[in-house]
Structure formats: structure tokens, C-alpha cells
Image (spheres, rainbow, N blue to C red):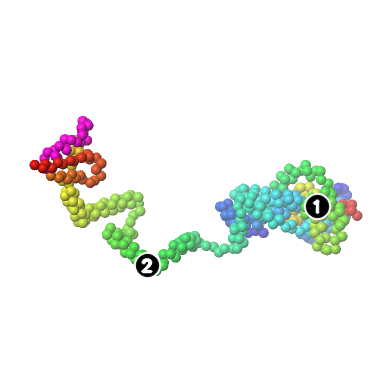
Amino acid sequence: MPDHTSKDQTSNGMQCNEFDALLMDAIDGVLSGTQLHRFQVHAGSCKACGPLLAEAEAGRDWLKGLTEVEPPASLVTNILASTTGVDTQRLRATVRTPQPRISWLERAQAWLFGSLEPVWATVRQPRFAMSFGMAFFALSVGLTVVGVKPADLAQISLRPAAIRHMYYSTRAQIVRRVDNVRLVYQVQAYVREFKRNVAPAEPGPAKTKDKKNDTTQQPEQKQERNYSQTENHLILASAPLGPFLHDLPVVSVTTYRRLS
Amino acid sequence: MEDVQVVAMLVRRCIAGDAAAWEEIVHTYNRRIYNICYRFAGSGNDAEDLTQEVFIKMYRTLPSYDHTKGAFVTWVTTITRNLLVDHFRKTKQDRMTDSMDATSSEHEDSQPLSEQIQDQSAPPDARVRSREVSETVHAALVKLSPELREAVILRDLQDMDYKEIAQVLKVPEGTVKSRINRGRAELARLLQRTYRQVM
């Protein structure tokens, strides 16, 4: 701050404090009229304030000559690397080219079409037309057999209880239909008859039980003797095929023909 | 200078994790921040480091920005100024050993200030001469006290109005004006003294 004297402070009706307060406005060029005149008179007469105005103006002019400095080319990259930690070359390209606003629906469609395009390109070939026709036919027949009607779909309730109820009722309906099909009955009857025809050579369950409970560790001679004593011709032994074959006793049969 | 709504939207996008929005902010403000740092610190290397620190701090504190309290550029400048003051305090001891003739920047020739002024009229090319004058003024600016320097930089180099400067420096507008006047006058005296010395 300049060293003001008491004489300078009151010269021309303006004090140095007031001059200091108006200095910035004067340099900015916003002072006018009487105020500007008083300011200029004080600046010309005050030994302290006059040089202060000149220095302030000179300093401003010096600073005007300072031009903006160009930052290093790597600055932005370094900043982005130190903040986000990613290489943003790709993002830089997207930022500089303004993109039109895209709604979420268009974005979803674009994503859907983009991901399905390879599949669709394969599928729409003519050679698959018959396959898709057959698949559609089979699906529609299947739905008709099950009893699904397109009109019913609109009335479906999505409450958990309703879904559970629909699941169990549909399942029961399917089981009932399958069980009531006449073809099933016929197949079951054929199977039973076939089993019955095969059954005579099958050892009875009581024998198997006896064998299982046999703790005497005796060989199968008793059974062998029975066969040889009762029959004088060749005897064919048979055992039923089935999953419990390994539980059956191993039987060795020897036959003797009498030549009398 | 900035559309408040646009900047507010940019900041919101950035807070939401939009990397492109953050990059846009960096592109928009890096030049300004770098220049403030360069004029205050005086060194290109320091300015680069400080600019990065400013952006790191900005990135972390971005959610605290409230566009109703002031312009984004003022907020950014406040962060920059606070960081520069911290940096000044940390490196105060180093600068106390400097003399007026010491080189303050790698952007300048490796000559003391007096030699730079002496050579001012030597180069025939006006462009080169202008650059040398700028470097001379820059060297003198760095020698100002930090209070005067920051006020002068924000007013004369960043074209901020007094209200914004008062907001950044957290002082009354009258004080801002006084500091700017004193800073300009001090700069002129410094350059005149150096100029007389070399004459």
C-alpha cells in the first residue's frame, strides 16, 4: 500500500481510502461523471495514489499479454487413467460424435435383433420350411389333445395359488386320460398273457423262500434225486428271465436213461 | 460460460457411473485447470501433476457438488485453488531459497529473468519476442505472494467476475478488488525494477 500523507488524503475532496475503493472500477471503465472527475483529479494530485493507478494499469496490461498455455497431449489420458483406471480410446470416439437419443424400446429391439440375427439367418433357409411346418402341426395337435385352447390363455390367472391349482388339475387330467385309453388296457392285457405263458417253468416263490432260509449248507442232491427217480426221459430245466435271476438257486441236473 | 442444466445433467450422469460423461468433463475443464495450476505453480511438470490431483479430487467429491449453490466452474476452481494453496504450503521451504533470477519453469529458456528481459528485443521475429515477454511476465507472476497471485490469475487470466472470485477465495468482494489492484501494481513494480536493473 502506498504511504499516504494527511495532505494527499483530503486533496480535491477525495480521500485515499475512497480512491482505493474506486480504483478497480476506474480501471474497469465503469466510473463516470463527477465520480470519475474527482478520481482523476485525486490521481493527478496525490503522490501516492497517482503511481498506484499507473502501476495497476501497467500490471493489467502485462497480464493481458499472457496467452493460454497448451496442456500436454497426454494430460487427458493420464487423468482418465488415474481416475477411472481404464483406457478410454473407445469412449473418446463416442464422446466426440454426438449420438441421437435412442429410446429403451429401440435399444431392446436392436439388442434382440442383433443377438437373434445369426440364428434367424440359418433358420429362414427353405430346407427347414417342412421341418417347421411339421413342428407347428405337432405342437397344435399336442395342445388340442391336452385340451389347451388359445381362448383359455387370456383367462389364465398368474397368482401363485392359481398356478399351483392349474398344475395339479392338469396333471390329474393327463394321468386320467392316459389310464383310460383303450390301447393301454390292451397292451397291459397282452403283457399279462405273455407272462402267464412263460410262467410254468418259473420256480415258485415258496421254494425260493425255502432256499433262502436254508441254513444246513447241504448241496442240491435232494432235488437232483427227485428228478432222476421220477423221470426216465430227458428233462429240460428252465428258469424265468428277469431282474431277480441272480437270486435263484443254481441247479445241476443229471438224467439217466434206463436201458431195461 | 456454462449451461447450468447441461452441466448438472453431465454431473448426474457421471455420478451414475457414465464414463463418457466423466471424460467430457475432463475434456472441457482440463485446459482451464492446467492453466491455473501452471500460472500459480510456475512449472509445467508441477502443473500437470496438480491438474491430475485436482481431477482425482473432483472425481471423488463429485457427488457433493450442488448446482443450486453455484456454477460448476466455480466449484472446480475452488477445488483447484485449495489444492494449489496446499501445494504452496508444502513446498514453501523450497521456494524460500529461490532468488528472483532463478528459473521458474521449463517453458522458459534456462536464463534468469534479467537476461530474459535483456534479450527481449534481440530476436527479430515478433512472435518469438512475444513469447519471451510472456515468459518474463510469467516468471514475475510466480514471484507474487500467493494471495495476490491467485486473485490476479482468476481475474486477469481466467476472466472470472469479482463475485465468483470472492466465492472461490472465501473473502469479501472488496478484499478481492484490493488484492487484484495490489497484485497488478506489485507485478508492474517487479517488472520495472528488473527492467531498470538490466538497463
Q: Position of residue A96 (x, y in %)?
A: 62, 61
Of B45 and A124, nearer the camera is: A124
Of A58 and A164, nearer the camera is: A164
Q: Residue at x 61, y 57 (%)?
A: A89
Whole-Å distance between the Cαs marked 1 and 2?
Answer: 82 Å
Q: Residue at x 39, y 69 (%)?
A: A126
Q: Nearer the viewer, mark 1 or mark 2?
A: 2
Relative horizontal placement of residue A118, taking residue B144 as reference (left or right): left
Q: Is residue A225 magenta?
A: yes
Of B106 and A37, nearer the camera is: B106
Indicate the secondary structure of the residue bearing disc 1. helix
The span shown in magenta is A211-232
Q: Which residue corresponds to mark 2?
A: A129
- Check the image and name the residue furthest to the right: B199
Residue B139 is labelled as 1
Q: Chain of mark 2?
A: A
Q: Quadrant of residue A227?
A: top left
Indicate the secondary structure of the residue bearing disc 2. helix
Query: Which residue type carries mark 2?
Result: Ala
Q: Is residue A174 magenta?
A: no
Query: Which residue type carries mark 1?
Result: Ala
